[in-house]
Image (tube, rainbow, N blue to C red):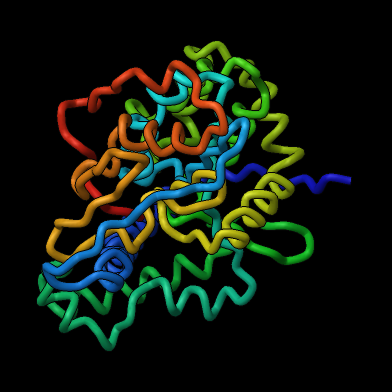
Amino acid sequence: MTKKIKYLKISTPSVIFFSLLLTISSFYSGISYYKNKTGTIQGEDTTQFVFSPEKSEKPELQFFVMSFCPYGNQIEDVIRPIADLLGDKADIKPQYIFNKIAQIDTYCKSSSGDPDQCASYVQSGYFKDESECQTVIADNLKSCLDTNNYIKTEDGSYYSSLHGRSEANQNIREICAWNQTDDKTKWWNFIDNVNKNCTYQNADTCWEEQAKQADFDTNKITDCFTNDAIAIIEKELEQTNKYNVSGSPTLLINGINFPPESAYAQDGKGSIKIDKKVISQDEYRTPNTIKEAICASFKKTPKECKEILENIDGSAPAAGGC
């Protein structure tokens, strides 16, 4: 039997907490992302990466995101024209990143900020002085330990997402909407509406109107959330654990990371070769580049692959992540 969860309205103190926690988490993840993206290739003497995925009749693109990660929202804007172009010729689907917390005390101490590092945080501009830093971290820890800020089950498991309970809720609703319709254009419209009109602070009250405008039955989404949330989260965790995914966005084409970390160069001069095309590092996250990577994964390339997709706003999205 599917476990049921109680839908909890996030409180104002929790919103403040997650806003503050996001600042700290962004600081940590920014450092981690920099190390990941620059640790493989150093200096100006870089090697060109050749992207050679296993070919299939219907290539699969999995894009791992969090519903309110700005870089994840950017990649959704990038992927939509590819999905519109290829339709059901490729299996393009979202995956969502959740945290499963076993030891909440340990988790909160590690994610609320290190008071011993306040001098460094102040120097980096995150706080005006060490007193403010100490106060914020203490408040973060107290709020983090409040179990009402998580999706929880009867067996004592806790789930959340980087931007808090509200983001975890929205992750689930977006998966419910995906599973509810074969017309994925409706789903993309829903995502576009939420990205433009909602935030992780107000998602629990904002989402419904966005879903209605995209022609979804919001009662069905709510029923799915109430009855299937835990099963949905665990299914997503299976995928993130299988591919060792922790950052939003992460793209996999037929199970292969795209772009791979080894294609990034510290000097910004990395490149990828896809078939006969050489693509520079600053163009990795563009509709046409990702389309080329998917198209290189077909056993029999469809005619749609000949179409050139333009950048959404004339520039490539920033190569950052949550």
Q: Quadrant of the C terminus?
A: bottom left
Nearer to the camera, 167 or 178: 178
In the depicted structure, whether residue 104 falls above or below residue 278: below
Left or right: 220, with 100 as reference point: right
User: Which one is nearer the viewer's eye here, 141 or 282?
Assistant: 282
Q: From the viewer's perspective, is residue 71 above or below residue 36?
A: above
> Farthest bottom residue?
116
Let me know if residue 171 appears in the view: no
Q: Residue furthest front?
A: 276
Where residue 79 appears, x then y in whole percent?
A: 40, 31
Q: Residue furthest right?
A: 1
Please tell me which residue lies in front, 150 or 95: 95
- Rendering coords of residue 314 (x, y %): 15, 27
Residue 134 position by quadrant? bottom left
The total of numbered circles placed on residues is 0
Residue at point 80%, 48% (across, down): 3
**Residue 136: x, y in percent?**
29, 70
Determine if residue 234 is in view: yes
Instruction: Answer above or below: position of 178 versus 159.
Output: above
Pinpoint residue 51: horizontal percent, then vertical percent: 40, 50
Q: Residue at x 41, y 51 (%)?
A: 248
Q: Residue at x 53, y 22 (%)?
A: 187
Residue at image location 53% in from the left, 33% down from the top: 298
| Residue 83 horizontal side relative to residue 284, left or right | right
